[in-house]
Amino acid sequence: MAIVFNQIMIAFIILMVVCLVAAVIHWYLDPKSYSLVELTQGFNAGYGIGGFKIHRIEPAQDTGKVLLNQVSSITIILLALRGVLFAVLTILIFRSITRILKSIRSVKTFYDANIANLKYTGRCMLLISILSFFNLGEWQDTWQINFSLPLGPILLTLFAYVLAEVFTEGKHLLEDKNMIV
């Protein structure tokens, strides 16, 4: 069941990336059509690209709201690249977890492949942690750079590396057991 869930999540993430790329292309062709779309979290650091809110009527220009039709094209491209990077890293993590679950199902828990997959997951989570640490964008001719300490990704990184060490120790114990028998 967990493997099916991982595959569904991967398909959903791919669909989200396709929608993101299509939205960026559409924004590039007609940015004025996004005058009612607000980037609600501005350029806050963290996992993802931030939230969006669609207004029924166009808000006043001096409210301090970041509307997508007012954002520079370089910022839209940076946000899209950030989103795609997060999506690719998340897909790689899900694929790694799927490989681990398949090997555990076939009773090959403490083997080198699982240890390598856990370390790979840790490296992907480390990249997500680094990307989540900052975000930047240009709005109203001013570059904004925001920093944040992404505790969730950092803790997941540590968890993956600790679990890799546990699996390494399990592998050594399994080898010792096999030598005794």
Image (cartoon, rainbow, N blue to C red):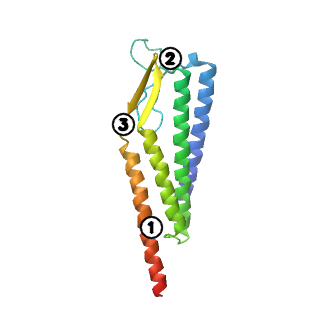
Residue at 39%, 54% in the rendered image: 158
Residue at 54%, 20% in the rendered image: 34
Q: Is residue 162 left or right of residue 11?
A: left
Helix, strand or loop under label 1: helix
* Foreground: disc 2 or disc 3: 3
- Residue 148 disc label: 3
Q: Amino acid at mark 1?
A: Phe
Mark 3, Cα crowd under 10 Å, few <14 / some 14-19 / many 20+, is few
Residue at 56%, 64% in the rendered image: 102
Mark 1, Cα crowd under 10 Å, few <14 / some 14-19 / many 20+, is many
Instruction: Report the residue marked by disc 1.
Output: 167
Image location of residue 80, percent across then percent down = 55, 32
In the image, residue 84 above or below residue 73: below
Helix, strand or loop under label 2: helix
In the image, residue 80 above or below residue 177: above
Helix, strand or loop under label 3: loop
Marks 1 and 3, the one that precedes in the sequence: 3
Q: Amino acid at mark 3?
A: Ser
Count of marks, rendered view: 3
Q: Hey, which quadrant is residue 129 in on the image?
A: top left
